[in-house]
Image (cartoon, rainbow, N blue to C red):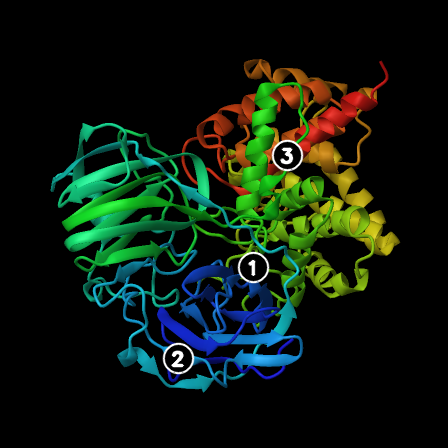
Amino acid sequence: MFLKAKPVFPSGKSETRNCFAAFRAEVGSLKGAELTVTAACFYRVFVNGRFAGFGPARTAKGYARADILPLGEYSETDANEIVIEVAGYHCRSLSTVLQPSFLLAELRRGEEVLACTGWNFEGYLPACRLQKTERYSVQRHFGEVWDFRGGAARLRPQERCELETVSPAPVILPRTAPYPIYRDVVLRGAASRGHLSFDETLPFHSDFYSFPVNDYWGGFAREEIAYHPYEWLQRHRQLKTGGQSDFPLTLNAGDYIILDFSHMETGFFAFSATARSEADVVIGFSEDGSPDAFAFTDMHVHNALEYLLPQDEHVEAMSFEPYTVRYAILTVRSGSVLLESFGVKTLEHPAAVAQPQRTGSPVLDGICRSAIRTFAHNALDIYMDCPSRERAGWLCDSYFTGQTEFALTGQSQTEDAFLENYRLYRNAGEYPDGVLPMCYPSDPQDNHKFIPQWTMWYILEVEQYLNLRRPDADREAFRPSIEGLLRFYRRYENADGLLEKLPSWNFVEWSVANDWTQDVSYPTNLLYAQALECVWRIYGDETCLRRSAEIRRAVIEQSFDGTVFFDHAVRGEDGKLTRCGDCSEACQYYAILFGGMDMNEARWAPLRRLVTTELTDRRGTAPVKMAEVNAFIGAYLRLEALLKLQEYELTLRETERFFGQMGKETGTLWEYRQRHGSRDHGFASFAYVAIQRALEGLRDQPH
């Protein structure tokens, strides 16, 4: 894909933590010119000061996906400037792989190379983005603190640096996911305004992370970090002094405004301002809150940016990374600022503009629109759990999101990339032989945690992908990863053929049911049986089909009492396996979906009645004490189970009940049914699929 370019980075900096570099080239006419570009970790391109793109699409360790950006529309004269900025984080995360930082870029017109790295791009180490900042989250990288007091709109001669070729060069892959679309969402003004007052009695988080930022993950010591905007905002009370106000607005030290985007947006914060005196501006953002009082979302992220602005210089600023926001607060820590505009340049999958067919229900229509927005925020280059805290590509989530992509677009371009990344993964001893990561591209957690069940969902997704969405794809490309998993599972089969005492983090769903995954988890074994059947569907392996049937018979014999399935059995000191009395709602859905049962047979009538009556509006009448499902994945398993039972009206009612309020509040769908965690979660877009399948089922039913 590259004719002449070499991967480069400032000399001695490719393994430096949180190194921000810029690369500049002066070129002639851009008519008909295209920029082929990739980087680690991320790049953004400006042509004559205009934003031209962000990337690259992420992929497996040792590889890089190249973007091709047409630049003709940015050509103003026969003299043009291209600046490519690169964030070389070089730290472990759950959203990228740890590898040396680099930029590889080539500007061509046809086969003519006009400029490229390793030839005529100059290198800079701009001081405007501070290196020693807090981690934004452990799952992502570093927070953003910008110091524009040396000049906001130019690279300075003293920041020039020598470049070196980075070795080994990554293997270059084409981008297969669609290119994002960018929209400028510009607010008219503030929803409210007020003044801050410091209060040392306020509770606050100083380092609010999902797990510790130790040397393995990479961070800076607190005493090395000069600015802590996240903590600073929490330690100030807000006194509202005014309501809605249009831009431009003058804000002095201690003043704040709250900005309301009316629904969730994902992208790059952008504002323009002129400081009347040298100023320090702090921006906080949240997925919750109100137009009158700002509060951070409780989800283990440092949702704050800080900008140091020069006196009397107009600044057009845009965050390097994309973030997710419903409400924002902009405060002036010191100085005085004339704020002229504030908004977000969105970063979305092209499906963001899709128009769903009307359902006949205003609530369902709203859920469909929210599902599309949720998908668009979470399917850019891989399937992500959320566009905020993690931006990570988790298995199981992808099983649901993959169905949404195909339903919305009739294609699987993002899924092509997502699954290819997993096929390219090479185990370097982080996990047992044959195991895949629970999310990827990522670095393994310090205890080498993985989720055995998520690898089974991988097999289920691959079967749907190959047989329903991409029957033209190469099945053999998946064989090594699937056969490796089968070898791993076989090591844990007991005398009954059931998986017993699977290692690491066993996960069936976010509820009490997840406390019942040992020693023999019946939901896990039902999922295992389905995975084996899927292997038969892909490769025609009759042995896998036979073993699938044997596992299902054993689960039914051990777990089913004539009405419900119980969750697990424990092996006692006498060596006998004893079924426990723990029973979850999720287990019933695993049984219906993966138990191979004809639910129209009389034997299963009590279970069907339980799912369609007692577990709807009359939960207190269930025959046994049963742990209720949470949103993930129980609520989605329930929707799939109802669809399998052809309970289409009930599917629509339950979808309205579960998702309706979410869409009204944020225009997106959430991780949990409760008001915490991400409120813009990729797998939740499956609600769109559930609605469409239910409507199709109703249309196809005889009248």
Residue 224 in the image: state x and y as whole percent: 21, 67
The residue shown at (72%, 26%) is 694
Is 47 situated above or below 345?
Answer: below
Numbered disc 2: secondary structure: strand
Q: Which of the two marks, 1 or 3, is nearer to us in this view?
A: 3
Q: Which mark is residue 440?
A: 1
Left or right of 208? Residue 481 is right
Work out which quarter of the rendered image holds the N terminus and state it. bottom right
Residue 432 in the image: state x and y as whole percent: 60, 65
Work out which quarter of the rendered image holds the C terminus and state it. top right
* Figure quadrant of residue 101: bottom left
Residue 402 in the image: state x and y as whole percent: 66, 46
Left or right of 41? Residue 399 is right
The residue shown at (66%, 79%) is 111
Left or right of 97? Residue 253 is left
- Per the model, the C-alpha gap separating discs 2 and 3 is 44 Å
Q: Which mark is residue 123?
A: 2
The residue shown at (60%, 56%) is 179
Q: Which mark is residue 382?
A: none
Residue 324 in the image: state x and y as whole percent: 42, 45
* Figure quadrant of residue 188: top left
Q: Dot 2, crowdedness within 10 Å: few (<14), some or many (≥20)?
A: many
Amino acid marked by disc 1? Tyr
Numbered disc 1: secondary structure: loop
